[in-house]
Image (cartoon, helix red, strand yellow):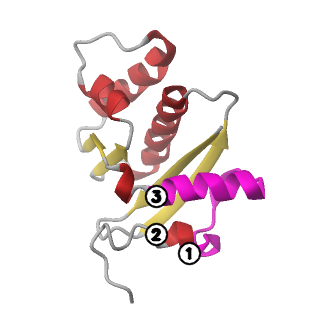
Amino acid sequence: MYLVVLCRNSDGWIIQARTSKIVGNNPIKGEAPATRMAFQVATSYRGVEVVVKGDCLNLVNQVADIESIPDWDIAGEVSTIRILLNENGKWKSGWISREVNFAAHNLAKWCTMSLILGDICIQNLPSDVGHCDDAALGKLPT
């Protein structure tokens, strides 16, 4: 299972992409390490407002509800994410609809077919990754 992180600036443009791979096929067990990886990428932006969004509402709710005990199979990731959020006051976590998150899913498919892992040069992203969410994000073609 491929894990994907896309970083966008405040205008919605992709500025960084990273992938990783884990063994398994349980969606929540893929979303949790992907979200943890997003926060690890965010450490490059300490002191800057960062919003990490994912389309797994179950995970977003578990991260946000600090009084609850997370599901046992993702407890480690949820705990790490909560710690990082606590340590970085300008960081937030939130939910994004799958309808405006096609780029991440398309990137995972492309990386799976191309066997690509790690940091990816933004200029090398195919258009179905780099621009598929533009209309949903309200961006006009340039």
In the rendering, which numbered label is found on residue 102?
3
**Residue beneath disc 2:** 132
User: What amino acid type should be assigned to the residue bearing mark 2?
Assistant: Cys
Which class describes the residues within 10 Å of circle 1: few (<14), some (14-19), or many (20+)?
few
Q: Which residue is drawn at the image coordinates 28% and 42% (left, top)?
A: 94
- Say if mark 3 contacts mark 2, CB within 8 Å: yes
Q: Which residue is drawn at the image coordinates 55% and 70% (left, top)?
A: 128
SS state under label 1:
helix
SS state under label 3:
helix
Q: Is residue 27 left or right of residue 11?
A: right
| Quadrant (top left/top right/bottom left/bottom right) for the C terminus | bottom left
- Seen from this angle, which residue lies furthest bottom? 142
Work out whether 134 lies above or below 65. below
User: What amino acid type should be assigned to the residue bearing mark 1?
Assistant: Ser
Q: Is residue 121 left or right of residue 6?
A: right
User: What amino acid type should be assigned to the residue bearing mark 3?
Assistant: Phe
Q: CA distance from mark 1 to mark 3?
A: 12 Å
Residue 136: where, in percent of width, then height? 31, 67
Asked whether residue 139 appears in the rendered view, the answer is yes
Q: Is residue 91 left or right of residue 78?
A: left
Q: Pick whichever, 115 or 47, lies toward us.
A: 115
Work out whether 121 lies above or below 33. below
- Say if mark 2 contacts mark 1, CB within 8 Å: yes
Residue 110 found in image quarter: bottom right
Which class describes the residues within 10 Å of circle 3: few (<14), some (14-19), or many (20+)?
some
